[in-house]
Image: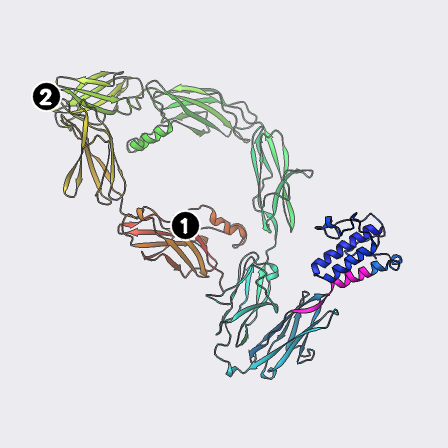
Amino acid sequence: MIQFRNTTYSMNRIARHLRNVARRKGSLLLILFMINTVLITGTTGKEDGKLGEEDEDFGWNDEEPPPDDNIHDGGIPLVRKEEFANNQLYAEAYQSYIQALAYPARLVVRPDSSTVVDESKISFFCRADGNPLPSVIWRVNGKSISDHNRISIKSLSTGLSTLRFERVSVDDNATVVSCSADNGVANPVVAEASLTVIPRDKVPTGFPQIELHPSLKSVEQGKTAYVSCRVRGDPRAKVLWLRDLIPLDIRQDGRYSVSTIGNPGALMIQHAREEDQGKYECIARNSLGVAHSKAANLYVKVRRVPPYFSYKLERQYVVGIGGNINLTCVAVGYPMPRVFWKKTDLMVLDDPSTAPIGKNVLTLTHVESTENFTCVAVSALGNIEATTTVIAKELPPPPLNIVVSSVTSGSVVVSWKPPRYNEAINKYLVTYKLKSLTEDNELFTKEEEDQKEQETSDNRHSNKKSTGGTVETLENSLLIENLNPFATYEFTVQSVGPVGTGLESLPVEAQTKSSKPETSPKDPQARSLNRDSILVMWKPSEKPNGVITGYKVYYTNDVATTPLRQWRRHDAKSDEFMTTISGLEPDSRYFVKVAAHNSEGDSPVSSLVTVSTRPGIPGQPIMFKAFAQDSRRIELNWHAPLHSSPIVGYTIRFNTTDGEKELTLTSPSEKHIVTGLHPDKYYYFRIAAYSDRGQGEFTEPIIQKTIASIPLSAPTILSGAATSSKSIEIRWKGPEQKKLNGVLTAYRISFFRLEDAIKPSHGSEDSDEYDEEYDEGFPTDSIEKIVVVVPSDVTSYVLSDLLPYSTYEVTVAASTMDGYGPESASRVVKTLEDG
C-alpha cells in the first residue's frame, strides 16, 4: 500500500523515484507521464515548482518518512486500500511504475547450428533475459523432449541453459533444435539451430579433433590447476570449456585462461577455489564442425585442520625480579589460526581480530610478581588455549671478597667467596676487559688493531693476546691467561642461580707485569750525512710490554747475512727516535737494524735498512707495497725516503720470463702501475730513489701475484620459468665486458632440488609454510649439484628430466681459458604439476 502522510512529501518521493527509473530505462514516455503527474497535483515541495533539482544525485529511498506504525517499506512505496480509491492519480502513477520495470524476453545467447561425427556428443546453448526473467524451453523437431536417456537439459537461475545429445547417430541428421523464452510481457522469442551428422568414414580433412583429452586431476585450494586438452583443426579450432555442462566464460574471471600455443586448448585455473570443482570437457569448433572431448573430474582439495600448538609452552617459567622474558606461542592449522595472549578473560593483551597469524611472542619486561598468562589460537574451526605461569624470584647476589692474585705478565688468578643465597649457585661468570695499556703501551682503535692483525697475522696468530671476555666456572677461583703484559684489566664476577644471572660485583683492577718488547721499532730509515756518517730514524714499538729504557742500533758493512752478534752496536736513549753514527768508511754500503729494550729484555730487531755513505744520495723508500689489479697489472705504492737533495725519480726492478727488468720513473710520484704481466704469476719488485747526486739503495724485494685470467663478475639470470612438469628454461646475459678478463669460452649451469636440502615443516609435505622456507638461508655446500656446460654463444637453456612440482635453485658461471668466475645470484623455479 502506498501510504502518504501528506501530499507534498509523497509526491516528491514518487516523482523522484519515477524520474530515476526513467533514467535507467531510457523511457521518454515515462518522463512525460511523471512531469504531467506532478503538474496536475500543483505541488512539488519546491517553491519554484521545479522537479527536485537539488536532489539530482540522490535515489528515491535516501530519505526516511516520518515514523508511522502503519508504514512498511520493502523497496516499493505502498498505500492504504482506503486511500487508494480516493487517490486515482496515485494509483495510475503506481501502475505505470510497475509497468516501467518490466521488459520483454530476449535471447542473449542463441544455439549454433553444428556438424558432428556419428556416435559423438553435441551441446547447444541458450540464454534468456527479461523482467520477469523468463525460463528457457527446449524442443527437438518442434516437440518437447521425451528421450531423457539420450538427451539431457541443465539450466541455471541466470537464464543460461544447455541441451546435450550424449550420443548422436546418422538418424539425427537434419534435426532442428529450438529454444524459446517467454515472460508474459510480449510475444515469446524463439531461436533454432540445425544438427548435421556425418559418418565417420566421411569426415573431411581439417575437421576438429581432440588429440589430448582432459584427465582426472586434483589440486590444493589456492594452487594453480592445469586441465589438459589439445585440439587440432584447419581452420584452427576455437576452444570452449564446460564445467558440469555449463560453458565457462573466461572473459568474466581473470583466474581462467586457455592456452593458444604449445598445448592449444589447455585450461589453467589460478588460485583454485571450491566452486572450481566439477566435471570438465573441452569443445573444439571450426567452420567444418564440432568435436567434444571426454569428460574428467577436477577435485579441489580443501584442507581443514583445527588449530593445534606446534611449540610446547612450558607449564611455568622462572624469572628474576625486575628481569625480562619472552613467551613464545606457536599454533598451526588450516586455515592458519590467529594467536593472541590474555592474562584473564577480561584482560586480553592483543586484539584477536588483528593478532599475528601462527606465532605470537609476548615480551614481559621488569617482571615484579608471579602471574598467569594464556595463549589462545583461533580459527574458523575452533579455538584452543594453553596457560603458563611466570614466577618472579629474587636473583642471586654477587660473590663476596673478590681478590686478584698470582699476577704475571700474561695471567692472573681471580678468587672470591660465595654469596649468601637461599638457593644453590649453579655457576659463576667472570668478566674481564682491558681498561688501558700502561705507560709506553699504545692503545689502538679497533680499525688499527684489525690492520695490524692483517699485516702480521702469520707471526702473531699463535700468541694473540686477549683484551677481554667472559668465562664460566663452577669453582670459587679462576686462572685467566693470554693477557697483555704491562696492562690494566678490570674484573667482575656474577652468580648464576636457577632463576638466572645476578648483578655484577663491583669491579676490581689489576695490572699485569712487564715482559720484553713483543714488536720491533717501526719503519726504520737511514741516509748518508757525509762520507763517514749516517742518520738513522725509527718509530717506537707498538707493543713495548713495559717501560722502554733505550734502543740498540746494529750496523755492519759486511754481508747482510752476518750473524747479529758480529755487527757493531750504537746505543740511543729511550726518548730518542733518531741517532747519528759516525766513523764509517767512505763510499761504503752499510746494513742497519734497530731493537728496543726494557727491564725484561730486547725486542726483535727491525727490518733491514741499506744505506751508502755517499753525500746527497737518498735513502731507501719506505712502506713499499704491491697490489694486484687484475691478471696483467700490479700497482706499487711507497713513501719517499730520507733525503738531503731533492728526489727527481725512482727506479723499479722486477723479474720477468727474460730475467730482471728495470723501469725508470722521471718524476717523484709515489705510485706506479706495472703492466704487461702474465696471469696467475708471482712477481718480485724492488725500488730505489735517485737525486741529481745519484741513485740510492734498492729496497728488499716484495712479492705479489697477478690474478688468474678468469671473469671478475658473474652472469645475470634474466628469467627462469617452468615449461612443463619436468623442465625449466633459464635465460641469462654474460658478465660485464670490462670485467670479462679474457675471451669467454663457456657457461656452467649448476642446479639442485631444494626439497633435497630442506625437510618439510610440521604437517604434510605440501603445506603452505613449506614453500616459504625456500627464502630462508641454509647451507648448500654439502648438496650435490648437477652441472651442465654450454658454449659461450648460448644464453638460454632448458633443464630437463626434473621431478614434477619440485623447486630448483639455479646459478650460472662464465669461463675463460683459465677457469670459471664467480657464480651468479641464484634463481628459484618450481616445475609444474604432472599431467
**Total labels drawn:** 2
Q: Which residues are magenta?
A: 92-107
Q: Quadrant of the N terminus?
A: bottom right
Q: Tell me the tag on residue 826.
A: 1
Query: Looking at the image, can residue 776 be seen?
Result: yes
| Percent x, y of residue 738 | 31, 46
**Residue for point 66% across, 81% down:** 141
Give 383 or 54, whichever is nearer the viewer: 54
Q: Is residue 367 left or right of residue 36?
A: left
Comes first in the chain, label 2 or label 1: 2
Structural crowding at the residue carrying mark 1, measured as other residues with C-alpha within 10 Å and reported as few (<14), some (14–19) or many (≥20): some
Residue type, label 1 = Ser
Read off the residue under disc 2.
586
Determine the secondary structure under disc 1: loop
| Percent x, y of residue 790 | 33, 57
Give 659 or 800, whichever is nearer the viewer: 659
**Looking at the image, residue 164 lies above or below residue 157:** below
Q: Is residue 604 left or right of residue 332?
A: left
| Percent x, y of residue 382 | 65, 49
